Image (cartoon, helix red, strand yellow):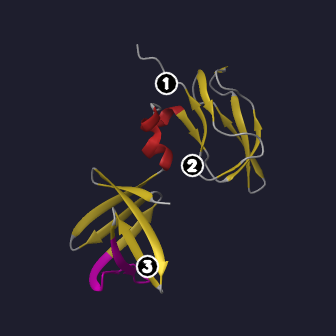
Amino acid sequence: MRHSFKLNDDVHALWLSRRAGKYLLDIDGAVHAVALDSDGQQLVVDGAATDALVAIDGNTVHVHLDGRHFELRYLEPVELHAGDHGAAADDVATAPMPGVVVAVHTTTGARVSRGDTLVVIESMKLETAIKAWRDGTVETVHVTEGRTFERSAPLVTFAPEAKS
């Protein structure tokens, strides 16, 4: 699976793999051998070493390289692709962690109120109720009882709110 990162205003598709003891980074189709020393102070790209400092803060990776600062932000698949189907990211309830669906309390077309339980999930033996974050109409229920899912998987999509 490719992962998408935003660097400045540009979105780049990345894939990191390991072959013959080396990491290969595929950035938009260009493949580079990469390594980062254990203390995150030196970055080696295609055999050329450069002093670097890398820090990770949630979905953001900060890289200080050659006196310049780069901020790469991991784009969750739902955030990246929500607009592709006419749904805004604010209209999609996503899984906060991987798990399994314990119960589904809504259906497509149902009117729900803020605070209504939509789906109950279980992860690491803890049940979590996914609740409606606003009043609205359920456009799609993406899961069924007993189905497993990964972090950030779409669970329920609301119909877009009417603009006034």
Q: Say which quadrant the C terminus sits in.
A: top left
Please give the residue where the numbered disc 3 appears in the rendered image.
23
Q: CA distance from mark 1 to mark 3?
A: 42 Å
- Which quadrant of the view contains residue 116? top right
Query: Residue drawn at (39%, 80%), measured in percent from left and top?
Result: 36
User: For residue 129, which quarter of the picture?
Assistant: top right
Tag 2 and tag 3, C-beta contact below 8 Å: no
Q: How many marks?
A: 3
Which of the two discs, 2 and 1, labels the residue nearer the N terminus? 2
- Secondary structure beneath label 1: loop
- Judge from the rendering whether residue 46 lies leftward or rightward of residue 107; answer left or right: left
Examine the structure image and report whether residue 93 is included in the region drawn in magenta: no
Furthest residue to the left? 67
Q: Which residue is mark 2?
A: 152
Mark 2 residue type: Ser
Q: Earlier in the sequence, mark 2 or mark 3?
A: 3
Q: Place residue 66 in its image quadrant.
A: bottom left
Magenta residues, start to end = 31-52
Mark 3: few, some, or many residues within 10 Å (few <14, many ≥20)? Answer: some
Categorize mark 1 by other alpha carbons within 10 Å: few (<14), some (14-19), many (20+): some
Cα–Cα gap, marks 2 and 1 = 20 Å
Residue hosting label 1: 160
Picture coordinates of residue 131 (x, y %)? Answer: 66, 33
> Which residue is situated farthest in the front direction here?
29
Q: Residue at x 71, y 36 (%)?
A: 119
